[in-house]
Image (spheres, rainbow, N blue to C red):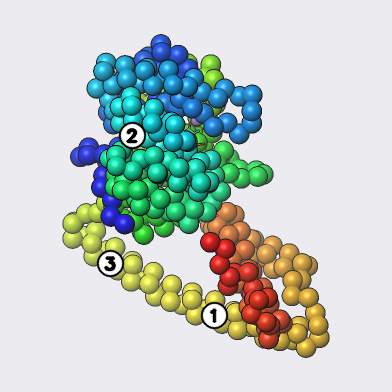
Amino acid sequence: MQFQPIFHASHRPVLIAGPCSAESEAQVLATAHGLKDQGVDLFRAGIWKPRTRPGAFEGIGSKGLLWLKRVQAETGMRVSTEVATAQHVQECLDQGIDVFWIGARTTANPFSVQEIADALVGTDTPVMVKNPVNPDYKLWVGGIERLYKAGIRRIAAIHRGFSTYGDSKYRNVPRWQMAIDLQQEFPDLELICDISHICGRRDILAETAQKSYELNFDGLMVEVHPTPDQAWSDAAQQITPVQFGDLIGSLSRRSISSDDPGYLSSIENLRQQIDELDEELICLIARRMELVRAIGHEKKARNIAIFQPERWRTLAEACRCRAEKNELSHEFIALFLEAIHQEGINQQERIVNHPMPAALAPADSRSHD
Ligand code: PEP
Ligand code: MN
């Protein structure tokens, strides 16, 4: 796939801002006027709101489109809203909405994305595709592909984090690697970070925006409301236009590289050392897996279960202590141990259950796509 840019601004990151939901004409226009001199490239407001549970405010509906038209006329900003059905697409096309976006709950449903894609055939509308609520990379790419196949070329991806169950400081955990993978696979696809839905709260918006700058995102999407505490949806994560200006002003922009010879030679040297260590790391892990396989044979001979909870608890605890002394975060070491453990279990499973009829091969070797 080869994409064209939605945003032509020479500056990066581009800024998308506006309320979670359009609530009244006055609220939409107050937000837009508060944002128009803050370098905002695209105004956002949800008109049809997919809510997790019924009974919450489900959007003002079609009349909100007229308010967005007033934003275009009075501020000169381009405007965008979320579409979830062919009917939404048609109404937005009729009203001249500049950019559409597909929400996280919709991206998770290929039937809905296909319906939207079909309704867009023959138009040249820019569309931004949010990641699905669940961390499924292929489903995200699949949504983008459906639009591409419908002839849409100006497509951007919006990273808004992933649903989680349990403790996290985020409303939707970012799992940054997935956004990094998307950038690697599609370098010309514009990638926007929706910090509001990742954070779900105001106090960590700035650090999250800064993180997205470090990871070379092309832009930010931020929910802005004239009186955030009174917002009809997502009150805890919205900020005022003034706070938006302060937030953007507080961020340090990074350049992608430098041709300073001092920088280039020192980075080259450090990267060489990293490459060598990476090679050693792979060899060490491979040696560790050899030992794991040897244990697998011992277990098989005596019909012993692969997973040994007590052993794993002790080992993980020892690694966590060592990691702490070496300034490695809990988060990292937990992920690292999980990956090592899973690979160990997979390798032992292959030994213990070998030979096995093809139909019963481990799930990871079969396709569910
Ligand atoms: C939104 O942008 O207001 C929204 C509903 O977001 P998401 O689809 O990411 O939950
Ligand atoms: Mn919202």
Mark 1 surroundings within 10 Å by alpha-carbon count, few (fewer than 14), some (14 through 19), many (20 or more) = few
Give the foreground label among 2 and 1: 2
Marker disc for residue 286:
1
Question: What label does residue 221 carry, if any?
Answer: none
Residue at the spot x=68%, y=82% of the render? Answer: 356
Question: In the structure shown, which secondary structural element does the residue marked by tag 1 occupy?
Answer: helix
Residue 272 picture location, percent across and down: 33, 71
Q: What is the spatial separation of the Cα atoms under label 2 and label 3, in whole angstroms?
A: 42 Å
Comes first in the chain, label 2 or label 3: 2
Residue drawn at the location 71% of the way across and 86% of the way down = 297
- The answer to whether the residue labelled 3 contacts the one labelled 1, judged by CB atoms less than 8 Å apart, is no
Which comes sooner in the sequence, label 2 or label 1? 2
Image x and y of residue 305, in percent: 78, 75
Q: Which residue is mark 2?
A: 99
Which of 150 and 233 lies nearest the eye of the viewer?
Answer: 150
Q: Where residue 195 sits: x, y (%)?
A: 45, 37
When the figure is inspected, residue 240 is found, relative to residue 247, above or below; the finding is above
* Tag shown at residue 268: 3
* Circle 1: residue type: Ala
Q: Secondary structure at mark 2?
A: strand
Residue drawn at x 68%, y 75% is: 360
Choose top left, top right, bottom left or bottom right for residue 25.
Answer: top left
Q: Against 108, is 263 above or below?
A: below
Q: Quadrant of the N terminus?
A: bottom left
Label 3 C-beta lies within 8 Å of the nearest ligand 1 atom: no
SS class of the residue under badge 3?
A: helix
